[in-house]
Amino acid sequence: MSIPRPTDNKFLHGPFAPWREENEAYDLQVDGEIPADLSGALFRVTSNPRFQPRNTDRYHWWEGDGMVCGIYLRDGRAAYRTRWVESDSMKVEVEAGEAVYSGFVNGGTPGRLPDGAPPAKNVANTNVGIFDDRLLVYYEGGLPHAMDPETLKTLGTYDFHGGIDVLCTAHYKIDPDSGDMLFFAATGPTITWYRADVKTAEIIDSHSFDIGVPVLMHDFAVSDHYAVFFVTPAQFRLDLIPQGRPGVVWDENSLDHGTQIVLMDRRSHQVTWHEAGGQFANTHFFNAYEQDGELVIDGHRITRLGTPADRLAAPIGSHEWFPPALPYRWSVDLATGRVKEEMISGIAGEFPKINDACLGRPHRYGYFVTTRGLADDTLSDGLARHDYLLDHTTVVEGPDGLTSPGEPVFVAREDPRGEDDGYLLSLWWNRATGLSELLIHDAADLRRVPLCRVKLPSRVPFGFHGSWADHQTLDRAVAACRNGQWLPPAVT
């Protein structure tokens, strides 16, 4: 059930409002037909405060506790399950019966930590997907957590068999050729690149380099030969959080040359810096690829992100420092190092996605949710498909007033005939019922009325990222768990 909050903070109401119960249901109501070749599970992780935040006026959407939602599709039927990610820091708050940790985005007043409690909270709320036959939940402030892919029981933290020590990014990429996982860790001013083997899950490549400032680095991009990182004025100031001050800071004075694009050659580990021009931040990337002597990078660009460095004593509202982002393209001349920037679409949006088979290669289509207007109760308001060849963006809104769509996930049809031959899966909020629905659209023929609507028995609080696991990947992971082929990972 949804619990009302004594605040007008947008991030505690409407599609963001906490949902306190874990739920499961079978044979869900479906309007239309689930495509026969869509068999597997959609996993989403939500930002869902289990207890009332200590400072409701400063609470930010990024700080909610992780609750994983699994929607299992097979033979035209759907089942549903949600479970909390039982991190050690969550157990501290469950034992106390209230929030103990303060916010890290806009600051706040922490409670008294009991002896032995983790010094900081691992909210485990940012991304989720199957790797190494485990359902892994990511948050870039700590180690991932492993869950049973069927029951969603939390099994403990996961460190890639000793390959990482403190944290890693929530944004991983899967190499379409090898199946290896590509990811990084941002610890203060140090960036560490990782590659994990798909068969053993062991780290087979890593390299660390210094960027000079503690950038809030959430996403990155990869091409065949490069890992792409943006160094922006958006900083994560870990030193300010214990003081109750905002930890996400916009500091243009920290960069002598404005925003920089940093490329790491995946073969040699050579790092090069390129001036992008101006003061801005990226939010998320569609993709990157090399073509005709250039590295092309597609993503979303935002004009500021965080509390201005000169306003730390009186933070501005979250909505003021998080304006709508726009789709942009950056082209780096690999011979001269010069960067060219252009806006791709004037339609504001977030959560860009592609057909993951195109990762690191030229892509024609990009999908995202639109944020054309910051409504009183929502952040997103439509689903978009951009055709880079025709330079055209198609936008559809939800049927029957559905709104607040989350990040779309592209799932290819069996034996696809083209890049866009597949489905878009996304969760939407139904204002009338207060619940969520899974909408399945034809990615090649995006229309307001989807192929089907799966009615969920609860509301999935508006969250960040997720992934699709086909039935073979899912069945293998479930069997590995049931047969005891792997033990719970390192216990926190």
Image (cartoon, rainbow, N blue to C red):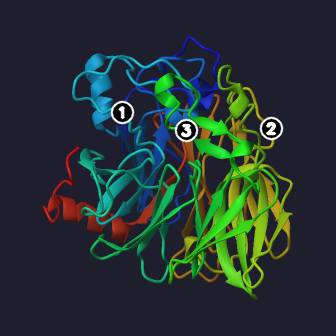
From the viewer's perspective, is residue 373 above or below residue 111?
Answer: below
- State the residue at coordinates (54%, 37%): 62
Looking at this view, is 262 or 373 the one in front?
262
* Residue linked to disc 1: 22
Residue 190's tag is: none
- The quadrant holding residue 371 is top right
Residue 228, given in percent of the width and then of the height, sits at 61, 68
Looking at this view, is 70 or 261 the one in front?
261
Give the class, few, some or many, for how many residues have Cα within 10 Å of label 2's Cα (few <14, many ≥20): some
Question: Could you tell me how far apart the alpha carbons at marks 3 and 1 are, in whole angstroms?
Answer: 34 Å
On the question of residue 390 being in view, the answer is: yes
* Residue linked to disc 2: 373
Mark whose residue sits in front, 1 or 2: 2
Mark 1: which amino acid?
Answer: Glu
On the question of residue 37 being in view, the answer is: no
Looking at this view, is 185 or 467 the one in front?
185
- State the residue at coordinates (72%, 29%): 310
- The first of marks 1 and 2 along the sequence is 1
Horizontal relation, residue 167 to residue 370: left or right = left
Quarter of the image where the C terminus is located: top left
From the viewer's perspective, is residue 7 above or below residue 261?
Answer: above
- State the residue at coordinates (34%, 32%): 119
Secondary structure of residue under mark 3: loop
- The first of marks 3 and 2 along the sequence is 3
Question: Could you tell me how far apart the alpha carbons at marks 1 and 2 are, in whole angstroms?
Answer: 32 Å
For the residues labelled 3 and 1, say whether their Cβ atoms are less than 8 Å apart. Answer: no
Question: Could you tell me how far apart the alpha carbons at marks 3 and 2 are, in whole angstroms?
Answer: 30 Å
Secondary structure of residue under mark 2: loop
Residue 236, given in percent of the width and then of the height, sits at 56, 42
Give the class, few, some or many, for how many residues have Cα within 10 Å of label 3's Cα (few <14, many ≥20): some
Residue 354, given in percent of the width and then of the height, sits at 63, 67
